[in-house]
Image (tube, rainbow, N blue to C red):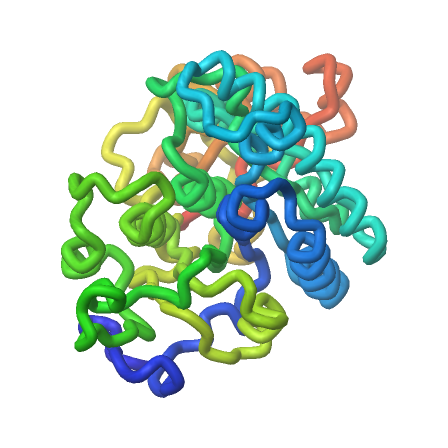
């Protein structure tokens, strides 16, 4: 693998040293910008959306999981409303988004259905990801859709938010979705080939960056810095999105969206665009985050059989193995798992709040619906959300 502690730069046709991070990826978030979706703002580009849909469908049918984060609702709404200039009033922008979202989702649904793959619309706000319960509900919905082989098409819910609670741009939204579903890689499709060491339109000595470390401060300086005033959706937002995605172990590829078969070629291992490599593996990043929790809201006590299943066999924690619940915690909190002697053996993300957990102690999953009034996860803590603290 290339040394990603420093930039790998070369002429744009030299792809040596670029790690094929997409080839091994199973779960991929793709973000596509407004200029590509709307043919530089002139309404939805049916041919382009059709090409991306063909690629998404082929990858889903090959066993991968794909999420599309798509811009374009406001531009399509402006076209449908007959507006020639972007409105400045928030209520008019929200109206344009509401009108345009109908066409945007209809286009993806039609094109994906023609390729034999289902689609779903998911509109998110910052509040959805800031609130624990809504965050977990959004995550559960998206993971279920992926298990069903459906492609979620995500956009910010522009019709109900104002500037104070907006994500700010869909690059940021793409990174947050990558964190939400623990994607392996984020692919940002844009109207540029990737990242250069300087603006090639102004500096003839600028070289193309094939690979770098996500979060490297030099990248932000090259793109103008966070306070540079670069327009919404500029290269700086992509670099910052890659930094955010790397927090959960996802690498990012920035590539030209009109490159033929760009998604499929990336998945075949071809080096296209700029690769910003996460320095921590996905599972390692998640488990390190759980292991580093210094203060936990509570814990569950388990019997010796459950200890053997968790420590000896790497299994999930089932409520039937729980003998007690301590503390006051909510669904999604990191809690400790303690053995019969009270010593911590593991910690992880709880699928249930403490009042529910107390009801489920020593109970089989067949009893959950009767006890809780609804059917829910069979595990108290799934093994993917569990890190051992004692071997």
Of residues 290 and 277, the one nearer the viewer is 277
Of residues 303 and 295, the one nearer the viewer is 295
Horizontal side of 249 relative to 218 (left or right) equals right
Of residues 103 and 253, the one nearer the viewer is 103
Horizontal side of 373 relative to 184 (left or right) equals right
Horizontal side of 240 relative to 300 (left or right) equals left
The residue positioned 61% from the left and 16% from the top of the image is 359
Residue 322 shows in the view? no
The residue positioned 49% from the left and 12% from the top of the image is 91
In which quadrant of the rendered view does residue 101 lie? top right
In which quadrant of the rendered view does residue 251 lie? bottom left
The residue positioned 18% from the left and 51% from the top of the image is 224
Q: Quadrant of the N terminus?
A: bottom left
Q: Quadrant of the C terminus?
A: bottom left
**Count of picture labels:** 0
Return the x and y of residue 383 as percentages of the image width and height.
54, 48
Residue 159 shows in the view? yes
In which quadrant of the rendered view does residue 348 lie? top left
Figure check: 266 above or below 150: below
Return the x and y of residue 386 as percentages of the image width and height.
46, 45
The residue positioned 77% from the left and 50% from the top of the image is 111
Return the x and y of residue 52 as percentages of the image width and height.
65, 58
Return the x and y of residue 133 as percentages of the image width and height.
51, 21
Of residues 383 and 162, the one nearer the viewer is 162
């Amino acid at each position: 693998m290339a040394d990603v502690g420093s930039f790998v730069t070369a002429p744009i046709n030299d792809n040596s040293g670029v790690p094929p991070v997409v080839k091994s990826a199973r779960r991929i978030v793709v973000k596509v910008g407004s200029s590509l979706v709307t043919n530089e703002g002139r309404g939805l580009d049916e041919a382009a959306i059709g090409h991306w849909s063909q690629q998404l469908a082929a990858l889903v049918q090959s066993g991968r999981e794909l999420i599309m984060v798509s811009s374009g609702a406001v531009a399509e709404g402006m076209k449908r409303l007959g507006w020639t200039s972007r409105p400045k009033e928030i209520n008019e922008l929200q109206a344009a988004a509401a009108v345009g979202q109908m066409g945007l989702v209809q286009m993806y649904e039609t094109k994906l259905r023609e390729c034999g793959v289902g689609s779903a619309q998911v509109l998110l706000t910052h509040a959805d990801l800031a609130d624990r319960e809504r965050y977990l509900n959004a995550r559960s919905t998206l993971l279920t859709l992926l298990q069903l082989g459906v492609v979620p098409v995500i956009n910010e819910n522009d019709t109900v938010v104002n500037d104070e609670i907006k994500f700010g741009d869909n690059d940021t939204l793409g990174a947050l979705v990558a964190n939400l579903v623990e994607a392996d890689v984020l692919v940002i499709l844009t109207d540029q080939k990737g990242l250069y060491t300087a603006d090639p339109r102004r500096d003839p000595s600028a070289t193309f960056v094939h690979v770098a470390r996500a979060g490297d401060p030099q990248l932000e300086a090259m793109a103008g810095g966070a306070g540079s005033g670069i327009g919404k959706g500029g290269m700086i937002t992509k670099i910052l999105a890659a930094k955010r995605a790397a927090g959960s172990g996802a690498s990012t590829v920035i590539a030209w969206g009109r490159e033929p078969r760009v998604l499929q070629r990336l998945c075949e291992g071809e080096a296209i665009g700029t690769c910003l490599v996460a320095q921590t593996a996905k599972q390692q990043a998640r488990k390190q985050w759980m292991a580093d929790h210094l203060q936990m809201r509570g814990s569950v006590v388990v019997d010796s059989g459950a200890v053997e299943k968790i420590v000896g066999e790497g299994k999930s924690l089932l409520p039937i193995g729980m003998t007690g619940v301590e503390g006051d915690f909510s669904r999604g909190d990191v809690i400790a798992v303690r053995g019969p002697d009270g010593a911590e053996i593991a910690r992880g993300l709880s699928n249930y709040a403490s009042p529910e957990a107390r009801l489920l102690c020593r109970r089989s999953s067949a009893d959950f619906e009767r006890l809780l009034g609804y059917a829910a996860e069979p595990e108290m803590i799934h093994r993917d959300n569990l890190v051992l603290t004692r071997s």
